[in-house]
Each structure stands twice: as C-alpha cells, then as structure tokens.
Amino acid sequence: MENKLGIVLVEPEIPQNTGNISRTCACTDVELHLVKPLGFSIDDHHVKRAGLDYWSELDLHIHENLEEFLKYAKESGRPMFFASTKSAKVHSEVSYPDNAFILFGKETKGLPEWLLEENYGQCVRIPMKSTVRSLNLSNSVAIILYEALRQHDYAQLKREGQIPKHD
C-alpha cells in the first residue's frame, strides 16, 4: 500500500470548506475521506467551485457513516489523530506517520465526545485565544496537514518555483 496521509472530514456541513479542503488535498497528494451524512451534495457547485481545476486530481473516498470509516481505518492498521479544541496536546508536538489519518469534525460540533474520550492520547489542537470558539475548518486542516507534511520534508511535493524573467 502507498504511504499517503489521509484527511478525514466527519459529517462536514459547509460546502465551501469542503471545496477548499479538497483543493488542499489535491495540491498535496493527500487522500480526502468524507464521512456521511454530508450537509450538502457532493455535486454541489460550491464544493466543485473551490477545487474545480483540481477535482480530477483528488484522491476521494466516501464512507456511509463514522462506524464504517472507523472499521476501515482499523482494518488498514493506519494510525489516527483527532483534531479538537478539547485536546491538551498541540498539533506540532506529535509525530505524524506518513500514512496517518487526521480526523476533523463538523463545523458546528466538532468530533463526537465519545470518540475523543476513547482516543484522547491521539487528540491534537491548534493553539488560539481562549475567548474564541475555533478556527475555520479549512484553515485548521491546512495548518495541521502542513505540519505533518513538514515533518516528512514535503516528500514528493515541488519545493521551488521560478519567476520567468529570473531563469
């Protein structure tokens, strides 16, 4: 099996967030797993608009519910990390294996508390002010994903660019 990070969105509600995350996953060659129920149609023009040019590059997996995904993840043997404002551990304080799943919950509620309780040692958070609820989901995915990619020296990603007049 190819070693590839996987971003998992559990019951995402906002199509624009999922579209932005789709584009981020396509640009970084990371799997995107969507766990139903979704708060929108996967064919919704808002989702595709945010990642339209990249949709064909996306490694997309759809799961009917959280239990189905958890069974899939367990059978794969891949480690899981759970992003939550309720975690005591900062996202940059853990090591992400190159085949890890990183789970994010729905925009309005996050991941189910029973899931966080069962996996508290694998929960991670992004530091932020205590007077605000949370960051936007697509920003949170980008922050944690890029920390995991940094730890692997951005393997297989283009690291340099060129300004045409400066060749």
Image (cartoon, rainbow, N blue to C red):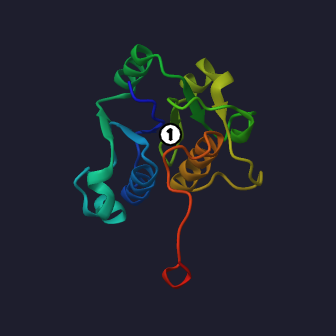
Residue at 44% x, 53% y is 21
Residue at 64% x, 26% y is 122
Identify residue for label 1: 105
Quarter containing the N terminus: top left
Residue at 46% x, 50% y is 28
Q: Amino acid at mark 1?
A: Gly
Residue sitting farthest toward the front = 167
Residue 134 left/right relative to 8: right
Residue 64 left/right relative to 100: left
Residue 44 in which image quadrant: bottom left
Nearer the observer, 102 or 146: 146
Nearer the observer, 166 or 76: 166
Residue sitting farthest toward the bottom = 165
Residue 46 makes an appearance in the image? no
Residue 43 lies, in percent from the top left, at: 22, 54
How crowded is the residue under tag 1: few (<14 C-alpha within 10 Å), some, or many (20+)? many
Residue 120 left/right relative to 5: right
Residue 112 makes an appearance in the image? yes
Residue 51 lies, in percent from the top left, at: 35, 61
Residue 65 in which image quadrant: top left
Residue 104 lies, in percent from the top left, at: 51, 40
Q: Secondary structure at mark 1?
A: loop
Above-or-below relation of 162 to 75? below
Residue 130 lies, in percent from the top left, at: 77, 51
